[in-house]
Structures are given as C-alpha cells and as structure tokens.
Image: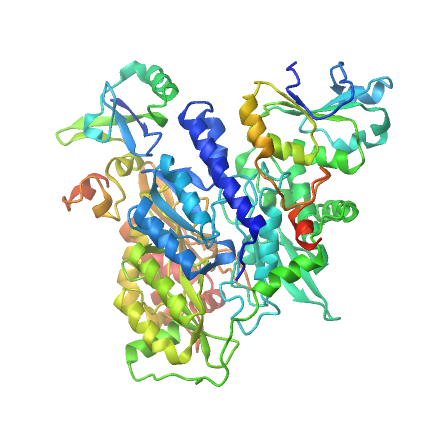
C-alpha cells in the first residue's frame, strides 16, 4: 500500500487498510473502508458514524467516479479521512481536494514542489462544494 | 517494407525514421524490418518523437510510398491546400497522394 | 457582451501558467504522453495529421471585434495565416507548435479568451443561438444563461473525467437554430403560463455513430434552479455512464439503456438532494451577467429599408440577412462558403476585416454559427450596402446562406487523425458544381462528415454525406431527410456508397429529383418527406 504523501488533518491517521464495501457491511468493528469506482458511496451512508477512513481508489486517473463518491460522502456529513489512492496525479489533486479529499496516497509519489503549486494554483473557484471555500459567485455579491 | 513515422514533440511536424534520426521527408524513410518496436520505444522515451508508429510502405521509382492514404496525406500535406504542402511549387504533387 | 472581472481574469491567467507548467513537464520528460494527453486536450490541444491543432473556445459563439482581431493575429503569428471556424462555434488552428501553445493562451487571455475544456471528457464550450439578442422570436437573450453555465462548468472539480465528452446548448426561442436536441444537454429557456422563467431540459441527444434526438426530461425547471438541475444530470451520468466502451460512453447511451423515465427518476432524486446543498449561484449573479447583455444603444427612427438597385447586393441581402427585433436593423450572415472554397476557413486578413466591420457597423459584436459562418448581429439597414461592398471585395460576399453551397464539413482526412475520408474536396466539388443552380434549388442543408464521429453533422443534413474507408479507398454514403431544427429528424441512408466523383453526381441527381417533384414552395426536405425515399433511390441506383 502506498504511503500517504499529503494529509490535511490533525487527527491520528488510521493504520488499518480499508476493507471492501461488501466486507464492511459484515464487520461491525471495521472503521476503514475502501471504495472502488463501481461501488455506490451511498451504501456507506448508514454507517458514517463508525467510519474513520474511506479510501477511494482511482485504478486509472481517467475514471472520474471517485470525485462524485467523495462529494456524496461529504455532502452527507462524513467528517472522517477521505483518502485518494491509486493513480493520483499532480494535475488532479486540487480538484480532488475540492471534492472533499483530505489525504492523498499516490501510487507513484508526486514531486512535492509540483504538488504544492497545484494545490495553490487557483486562488478562487466558481462552484461551491463542501470544501469550505467561498465561491466567486458569493465573493461577488457578499 | 516497414517504416516508422511520428510527430516532432515540440513542433508537431510529421517525421520519418531515416535510420539515424527523424526526417521531414518520407523519401528518407528506411525499412526497419523487425526492429520497429525497439526503435519506437527508444526514440519515444528520449522524446525525439511523439505518437510514433510503424506502417507498411512500398519503394518504387518515385520513392517511398506509405500504403495508406492517411500517411500519404501526412507525408505531403493537406490535399486542399497545395500551398501548405512540402511541395508547393509542384501542381501535380497531390496526385501521388490519391 | 460579457466582460471579465478580476476573478474571471485571474482564472484564465492561472490556467495559462498551469498549462505552461504542464507543457514544460512534458518537454522535460516528467510526464508521459499518456499522462499529458488528457491535460493538453482539456486545453483544446490535439495532435493531428500535420501538427498540433489548437481549438479556442468562443463561448456561446459571441466575439468582440478585439477578440476577433486577436484570432486573426494568432493565425499570422503562430499558424499559417488562417483559421477554421467549427460546428461548435469555436475556431481551430491547424499548424500549432507545442512549445508555442502557452504563448498563444497568454495572448488569448489578454482579450478574455481561452481554450479551457474545448476537448477532453469534460463539459465543453456551451453553444447558443447565433442570433441571440437580435432575433425577434426570443423570450429572453439566452446568453446570460449560457455564461452562467460557462462559469459553473469551468474547472468543475467533479466533472473533469466524465465517461466521455459533454456538450450543452442553450436557446430561448421556439425556433431552434442551435441543434439543441442533438446535444448531451439541450436547454430551452421559456416562460410558463404564470409568466415565470424556467428551463426545459432535453438530455441524451447526440450525433456520432449512434445518433439520438434528446427527449425532454423536465419541461420546466425554475430558472433559479437551472445550475442545480444541470449538476444532478451530470452527477448521474458521471456515476453511471458506461466506461467499458468508448463508443457507448456518451450520455445518450445511458439515457437510452436506462430509459428516459428511469434516468429522469435518478436525476430528480439527485436534484432533490442537491437542492439541500445550496449550490445554485445567487440570483444577483444572473442579474449581474444579464446586465452585460443589455441591448446596445440602438437608434430610433433609422430607415427601415435599403436601396436595392444593385442586383447582386439585393440577392445577397435577401439570402444572407435575417429580420432584426429592432426596426431599421438587420442581422447579417457572412458566408465562409465561397463556391469551391473550404467550408469554415477564413484567412487572417478576412478575420481582421470582419472584426473591423463589427466595430464599425455592428456595435462591436460578432457571432460564430454552428453552420461555420460569421454573423454581424446588429447592422443598420442604411449601412448594409457599405458592409456588403467591403465583404464582396474580400471574397466574403457569397450569397448562399442555407443553400446547397452553404455546406457544413468537418476537416476530414486532410487534417484530422480520426477521419476515414476527406470531406473538404467533396464539399468543394459539390459547391462548384451546384452553385449556378443554388437559388433555384433553394434551402438545402448539406452536411459532410469524414468519419462516423459525425463532426460534420451528416445525420442532420437534408442531404448528409458520410466518408468511410472501404479497403483503403475513400467511399461516401449518402443520406436524406435529416434536420436539426424544431422538427429534428435523422437522415436515412439511400443505399450503397459512391466514390468521390460519384457522390457529387449523386447529390446533383437528388436535387433533380427534388426539382422534378417539388410542389409549390416546398423545400427539398418537405418534398423528401412527402414523396419518400423511392424516387431518389430510383434516380440514384435504378
């Protein structure tokens, strides 16, 4: 399993690897789960209070289902760690952050300077998400 | 014969493998035989070519002629703008493509 | 017209810097072509047959004269002196160097332009009615809604890697001049019985190898929920659109396979959820945008007629100009389809001339049409003759709007790496052959695609031509009866295909069948719909 390279949280990281969504339903003591692109993030909603880590896997960077999964989880109030794993590339991490990811464990570690530039690239954004940034639409109209 | 073609990474210009380097002219293309994959991998990794691939071609008195019309259009330029082709002064150059 | 504020400008400036960095990383070998390709595509940069190709966004087809002039200057400075206007109201340059692409984007940013999301599996440039703001029949100007969608879709973090590309169109009149129902989402702005503004959503249309006409999934979404509803449509697609087969990945396949009702049910459920998330822009934002699309200062009491003594001018005025909502004004379409020319191409000088005409005669505005022409939307009738004279002198005075020579054609195998056959030479031969009988034949929309991806909209042509590769030889299939307007229909293939000269003969024969069977003022399409395929088949293959 790849190491977490960037983490935007202060709590203690969960060491356990995430179990599959199917296994998670049966293991009432599991607190980490791994979501594959074909999994329905909404299946986890009844269990959010006992989840501390959700790994969302990007087996290939071009499969964008994980972005919707992340937003659905955050919109439902999930406050635990949301970790992007797999083919996580530097040009995608800022968008992932906007969708609610707060930890990144890229299969191939990213150049730290490139990553820092990517996270900081866009000072303002048009759309509201749950990332807490005030969208341009709001900034314009107070 | 089997020849290699691609585009220059920086400029996008169509290029042909001449045995040593990448040429703008299809008539410089050489038969690579069984070595296509090796050359393509090496040249792409060195970023001397982009999106390169091997094609079938024939050698005749006019030079090297790619088997498919697409690569003949790549070799010369758009058939509808003779002025933008590699042979703007030759009004019959387009006949080679078709 | 929309003007950037500091936020919009900062966004495109940051994009230039980001792309410069991405190109640098590619040239230095930090990323592979496989990783770079989606990044350059999301900036409209393709690798085509002869070089890189850059597609520049023209949001909802609207340009100022300064923007148009920049497009001409870029053609000279970075390309080979011309540009190609596309069916999605954009412009493409065919001879771009990767190392110069960031500089082009920087130049574009100085006139509030960009190439953001002009390709890639993301939400593309939103198109609209080319006569927006000028048309007599519009409920409102659709462009403020398209601009709102532009902002919402720009770097939308959730929708950068959709199953496939995603195209939206917005209109606001009953007459559809934007082929709205052939888009992934077509939106028609309208008023309900109570007079409130809303948006009808048509989802799942498209061309390509499986052409579909979008069904209406909601006939009225309150206007202050339009973005939220769009987001719901996209989220359902992003989650459930097919990713196993590129050719079945467009939303039309999802809507078709789920069925309109089930897709709609899922969208409505997502919509109900998203309404709780307060993602809709504030009403003040729409008002801010709409204020920038207020009418230009039209003059009252200007003459509502023009001198028609020059017959060539009168023919052009009658063919290429449309009524305007204001007396004394007229909307002018500049045909980029001279007989024997390359459809949609314009030289740098022609582009700059059109910019000058917009500045001098059309309140600084131009439009690109999905039929690959240019519109001067607000010309005083008193100035029309002067405008025509300048166009005519520059080779832009062709009088053939919606005539058989006004051909939509994709770049085809002369430029495009996906094409199976050349489109342009076929267009050139047809327009040359039939130009002398253009006025007699009347309205006839002919559309040519060089491959099944249908960028030339052949499915929607009254006469459609599809180029295919038959054992290494170009071959052309003919179809009849397509239409993209309010009565959208898809063309039917006539039978076996033709070679390059054969297809030109076949088109001519089809026009002869029409003229022989025409009743009253029927257009080609009307006659075809009445008499059916049989007499055409008989003439073509009998």
In the figure, residue B78 lies in which quadrant? top left
Estimate the x, y position of residue B47 in percent, counting from the top left: 36, 23
* Point 65% across, 48% down: residue: A136
In the figure, residue C514 lies in which quadrant? bottom left
Estimate the x, y position of residue C239 in percent, counting from the top left: 67, 37
| Quadrant placement of the C terminus of chain C | bottom left
Up the image or down, A32 lies above or below B25; here it is: above
Up the image or down, A7 lies above or below C139; here it is: above
* Point 54% across, 21% down: residue: A111
The mark tally for this picture is 0
Estimate the x, y position of residue C245 in percent, counting from the top left: 55, 33
Q: Is residue C28 left or right of residue A141?
A: left
Q: Is residue C35 left or right of residue C282?
A: left
Q: Nearer the viewer, residue C84 or C500?
A: C84
* Point 28% across, 26% down: residue: B56
Q: Nearer the viewer, residue C524 or C50?
A: C50
Q: Nearer the viewer, residue B36 or C82?
A: C82
Up the image or down, B20 lies above or below C98; here it is: above
Q: Is residue C466 visible?
A: no
Q: Nearer the viewer, residue C538 or C385?
A: C385
Up the image or down, C93 lies above or below C381; here it is: above
Q: Is residue C315 visible?
A: yes
Estimate the x, y position of residue C451 in percent, counting from the top left: 41, 44
User: How is this picture coloured?
Assistant: rainbow
């Amino acid at each position: 399993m790849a190491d977490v390279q960037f983490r935007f949280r202060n709590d203690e990281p969960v060491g356990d690897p995430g179990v599959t969504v199917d296994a998670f339903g049966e293991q009432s003591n599991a607190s980490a789960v791994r979501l594959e692109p074909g999994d329905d993030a909404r299946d986890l909603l009844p269990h959010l209070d006992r989840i501390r880590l959700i790994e969302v896997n990007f087996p290939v960077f071009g499969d964008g289902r994980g972005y919707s999964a992340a937003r659905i989880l955050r919109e439902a109030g999930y406050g635990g760690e949301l970790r992007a794993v797999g083919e996580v590339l530097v040009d995608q991490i800022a968008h992932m952050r906007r969708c609610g990811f707060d930890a990144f464990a890229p299969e191939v570690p990213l150049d730290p300077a490139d990553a820092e530039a990517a996270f900081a690239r866009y000072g303002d954004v048009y759309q509201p998400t749950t990332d807490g940034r005030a969208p341009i639409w709001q900034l314009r109209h107070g | 014969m089997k020849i290699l073609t691609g585009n220059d990474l920086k400029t996008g210009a169509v290029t042909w493998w001449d045995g040593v380097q990448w040429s703008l002219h299809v008539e410089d293309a050489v038969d690579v035989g069984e070595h296509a994959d090796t050359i393509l991998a090496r040249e792409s990794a060195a970023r001397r070519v982009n999106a390169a691939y091997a094609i079938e071609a024939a050698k005749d008195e006019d030079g090297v002629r790619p088997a498919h019309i697409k690569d003949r259009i790549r070799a010369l330029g758009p058939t509808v703008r003779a002025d933008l082709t590699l042979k703007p002064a030759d009004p019959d150059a387009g006949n080679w493509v078709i | 017209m929309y003007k950037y504020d500091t936020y919009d400008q900062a966004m495109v400036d940051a994009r230039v810097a980001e792309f410069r960095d991405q190109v640098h990383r590619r040239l230095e070998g930090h990323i592979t072509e496989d990783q770079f390709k989606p990044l350059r595509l999301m900036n409209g940069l393709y690798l085509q047959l002869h070089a890189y190709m850059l597609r520049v966004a023209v949001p909802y087809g609207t340009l100022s004269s300064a923007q148009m002039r920049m497009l001409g200057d870029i053609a000279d400075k970075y390309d080979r002196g011309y540009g190609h206007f596309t069916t999605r109201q954009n412009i493409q340059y065919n001879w771009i160097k990767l190392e110069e692409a960031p500089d082009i984007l920087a130049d574009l940013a100085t006139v509030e332009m960009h190439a953001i999301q002009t390709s890639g599996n993301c939400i593309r440039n939103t198109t609209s009615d080319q006569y927006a703001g000028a048309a007599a029949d519009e409920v409102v100007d659709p462009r403020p809604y398209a601009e709102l969608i532009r902002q919402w879709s720009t770097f939308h973090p959730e929708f950068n890697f959709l199953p496939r590309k995603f195209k939206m169109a917005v209109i606001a009149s009953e007459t559809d001049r934007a082929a709205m129902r052939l888009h992934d989402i077509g939106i028609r702005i309208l008023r309900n019985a109570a007079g409130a503004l809303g948006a009808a959503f048509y989802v799942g249309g498209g061309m390509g190898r499986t052409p579909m006409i979008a069904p209406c999934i909601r006939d009225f979404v309150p206007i202050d929920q339009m973005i939220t509803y769009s987001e719901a449509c996209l989220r359902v697609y992003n989650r459930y659109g097919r990713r196993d087969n590129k050719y079945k990945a467009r939303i039309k396949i999802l809507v078709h396979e789920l069925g309109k009702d089930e897709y709609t049910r899922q969208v409505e459920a997502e919509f109900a959820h998203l309404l709780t998330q307060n993602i809709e822009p504030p009403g003040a934002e729409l008002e801010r945008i709409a204020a920038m699309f207020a009418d230009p200062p039209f003059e009252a009491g200007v003459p509502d007629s023009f001198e028609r003594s020059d017959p060539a001018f009168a023919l052009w005025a009658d063919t290429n100009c449309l009524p305007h909502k204001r007396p004394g004004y007229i909307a002018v379409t500049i045909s980029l389809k001279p007989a024997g020319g390359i459809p949609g191409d314009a030289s740098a000088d022609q582009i700059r001339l059109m910019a000058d005409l917009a500045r001098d005669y059309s309140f600084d505005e131009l439009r690109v049409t999905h039929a690959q022409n240019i519109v001067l939307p607000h010309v005083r009738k008193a100035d029309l003759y002067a405008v025509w004279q300048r166009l005519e002198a520059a080779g832009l005075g062709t009088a053939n709007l919606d005539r058989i020579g006004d051909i939509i054609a994709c770049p085809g195998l002369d430029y495009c790496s996906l094409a199976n056959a050349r489109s342009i030479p076929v267009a050139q031969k047809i327009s040359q052959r039939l130009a002398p009988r253009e006025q007699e034949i009347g309205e006839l929309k002919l559309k040519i695609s060089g491959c099944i991806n249908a960028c030339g909209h052949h499915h929607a042509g009254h006469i459609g031509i599809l180029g295919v590769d038959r054992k290494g030889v170009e071959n052309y299939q003919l179809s009849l009866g397509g239409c993209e307007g309010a009565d959208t229909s898809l063309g039917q293939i006539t039978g076996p295909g033709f070679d390059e000269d054969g297809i030109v003969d076949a088109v001519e024969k089809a026009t002869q069948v029409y003229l022989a069977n025409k009743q009253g003022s029927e257009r080609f399409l009307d006659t075809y719909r009445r008499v059916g395929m049989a007499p055409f088949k008989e003439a073509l293959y009998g």
